[in-house]
Image (spheres, rainbow, N blue to C red):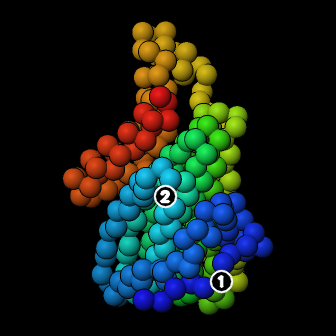
Amino acid sequence: MSFALALPTRRDESWRYSDLEAVASVWPIAAPERIEVAAGEEIARVIVQDAAPDAVAICDYAVVLGAGARATFHVLNTGGRLGRVTIDVTLHEGAHFELGAAMLGGGEQTLEIVTTMRHVEPHATSNQVVRSVLGGKATGSYLGKVAVARHAQKTDASQSVKAMLLARTATANAKPELEIYADDVKCAHGATVGELDANALFYLMSRGIAPVEAKALLLRGFIAGVFDDVADEAARESLDAAASGALERLLA
């Protein structure tokens, strides 16, 4: 097994918001898990990162999609003192990558999702949807780079990033990044950070719903769409249960 040897610093943009003290405690880390999807094939992957509260969990994936291949990743990142998921994807002609992810953290957790979409050939597409709910003094960061090669015309890439803060002491970082060398592409990104809608919360409470339950309903609605398209029913139910448990802990 190979390992990444150089300890990162804040000069490395992808580690800018990380807990480097926690990283150092487990360094060096193993090289990314490599996943290759042959031309025309399709895979689906569900990743639940729910390590123990004092653990350091760094999960790295390198995905290569052949011509016309498709990959769908669903990620729930909730555990550990530091919970980090990185996904580096290379897309060949006509390939598609889909990401639906949620980060749910509280206390003094640091949670991160870092993605790189390398569009190296024409007509490939990628879509990323990331939702975060953060309480306490937690930090949640999404750093997503879309790199389009010079000859990768007709690329279509999108990123949608939204974070909900349950406390003013929580921090959400969102850094979508585009590096485009082709001239016939469609790339879009959007990032927002907000708080629970006070009017919606008041409406639910006025209908007799307890405050904690009302908040939970709004937060479930906020992240609901992320996992709706999980094809495997058992996996979807497991994700929903894990997400509901994490939300309950945040609101306790």
Q: Mark 1 belongs to which amino acid? A: Ala
Residue drawn at x 48%, y 80% as measured from the top left: 30
Quick one: 74 or 137, which is closer to the camera?
Answer: 137
In the rendered image, the vertical position of residue 109 relative to residue 67, given as above or below: above
Q: Is residue 182 visible?
A: no
For label 1, the SS is loop
For label 2, the SS is loop
Quick one: 133 or 145, which is closer to the camera?
Answer: 133
> Quick check: 181 left or right of 100?
right
Q: Mark 2 belongs to which amino acid? A: Ala
Question: Would you identify the image quadrant in which residue 27 lies?
Answer: bottom right
User: Could you tell me if the residues under marks 2 and 1 are in contact, i.e. CB atoms within 8 Å?
Assistant: no
Label 2 sits on residue: 55
Q: Earlier in the sequence, mark 2 or mark 1?
A: 1
Q: Position of residue 247 (x, y in %)?
A: 45, 37
Count every numbered label the image shows and give the total: 2
Residue drawn at x 63%, y 56% as measured from the top left: 141
Q: Position of residue 231 (x, y in %)?
A: 27, 58
> Quick check: 24 left or right of 60?
right
Q: Is residue 2 visible?
A: yes
Residue sticking out furthest to the front? 25
Residue sticking out furthest to the right? 11
> Quick check: 240 left or right of 166?
left
Which quadrant does the N terminus fall into? bottom left
Label 1 sits on residue: 6
